[in-house]
Image (spheres, rainbow, N blue to C red):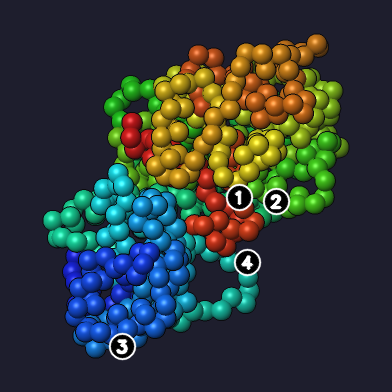
Amino acid sequence: MIQIDVKAGNADKQREDAVVLPLLDGRKLTESGKELQEATGETVADFLRKFDLLGDFGVSRTLYDVAGMHGHRAIFIGAGSEKSLSLHKLRVLAAKLAAKLEKSGARGAAVYLTELEVKGASLADKVQAVAEGLWLGLYKFDKYQSKTKENKRALRSVNIMVTSRRDLDDAEVALANAKAVASGTIFARDLSNEPGNVCTPEWLGDQAAGLSHKNLKVTVMDKAAIEKAGFTALLAVNQGSAKEPRFIVLEYNGGKKGDAPVALVGKGLTFDAGGISIKPAGAMDEMKFDMCGSAAVLGIFKSITEMDLPMNVLGVIPSTENLLGSAAYKPGDIVTSYKGITIEVLNTDAEGRIILCDALAYAVEQKPSEIIDFATLTGACVIALGGQATGLLGTGEKVKKGLKESGMHSHDRVWELPLFEEYQKQIDSKIADIKNTGGREAGTITAACFLSRFVENVPWAHLDIAGTAWNMNGTDISPVGGATGAGVRLVVDYLSRK
């Protein structure tokens, strides 16, 4: 991650390779832009007219070696309409700027984006959004490319400029929060982008164990320990794989002793071929992303430990592959879960809910205040919501309301689907307690109905990230494509507000 700092000062006095100024619709400059224009005579005004820069969002032009300013470049980047600006648009603008700077040859930059007015946003909000955009916009996953070109003039540092030195203390706090959130998101992306022959359950357990903090304890159970504990549903899904499963427990005790923790549960399917109910060959390579729920949990833990959040948080991750070995579990099998509930297996590709049920039941035993689970659970959620929002279901009204609010603030958005009692009938089994699929209708909802049988009376929210966890074409703040780190910004924001 590049070095980012906050600083106050006039644009014409900055000595960085690039000074970046926003331009609103109608060639409207912010205060620092006006000051630079005044300090450089007619140069800036002539430049803006010559290149017909009108302030269109993301469109930028560079002016070099301007008399009257110390910096080598003045970059003007369009911010669009002031009325339509939001924190996320600021984040996206920063991500676009980061890509521009990386290619420009500038090693350092002074960025004045926080001068833009965003309705309802504080300066700290704007600093955090800009910093997140810069860090996340520069994300790459190229460790397996043997012929990557070295950028000898890569961007090394950015100063996010604020209006007054009086604002520096608040800006520093916001920057630290942004760094923690970006660090957690990047960690989640890195874990998820690893290929399945590297990211095995054992490897995932090692990554969890590698997280270090004075208030963090990590326990990674191997197969023998899983068998002893009785996580039988996880073991059933694992039967077809030569790779051992892992059951990962993270305990962060940053709050008062005895305070009930918030429990985060993440699906850790490191590769999902569908088992006997095998998936189609097309895009099966993307099933390495079926562990993005676990990556979100680990990313959140990385963020909250860096932030030293004053609260207790429990993480639970069941991890396995779902393959087609000779011992693989089969359609028609009856599996007994850790909780004792029996499951009729109708489709071995509906395995995520089977491993999650053991993790949820275990989490309930730890007496949490609430449970949030993350899972790339259903293709039905992709059909319903696409890649724009994570599916939200659950029984905890307060936690769901908080996640909705944090989703809007962080732009890691959620959309609630109903969990009416009538849907529960679709997973009733004639020969077991429940079946692992309720058919094609309301697939996202019936999957949540299955999970709801294991959370008892604990307030619970289920996040189906199947549509948001990865995007092979890239997103506005994940332009390279692949894993997005969905869920990290959302839940770190939620936990920070508790």
Query: Could you give the CA–CA distance between mark 4 and mark 1, rounded to whole angstroms?
Result: 19 Å
Q: Which class describes the residues within 10 Å of circle 1: few (<14), some (14-19), or many (20+)? A: many
Closer to the eye: label 1 or 2: 1
SS at mark 2? Answer: helix
Q: Earlier in the sequence, mark 4 or mark 1?
A: 4
Q: Earlier in the sequence, mark 1 or mark 2?
A: 2
The relative height of residue 384 versus residue 157 in the rendered view (above or below) is above
Q: Cα distance, mark 4 to mark 2?
A: 17 Å
Residue at image location 52% in from the left, 49% down from the top: 485
Task: Please indicate, yes or no, whether residue 446 appears anywhere in the rendered image.
Answer: yes
Q: CA distance from mark 2 to mark 3?
A: 47 Å
Camera sees residue 362:
no
Q: Nearer the viewer, residue 453 or 438?
A: 438
Q: Is residue 262 left or right of residue 274?
A: left
Per the image, the residue denoted by label 2 is 286
Nearest the viewer among 491 and 477 is 477
Q: Residues within 10 Å of mark 4 (few under 14, many from 20)?
A: few
According to the picture, the residue beneath numbered tag 4 turns out to be 144
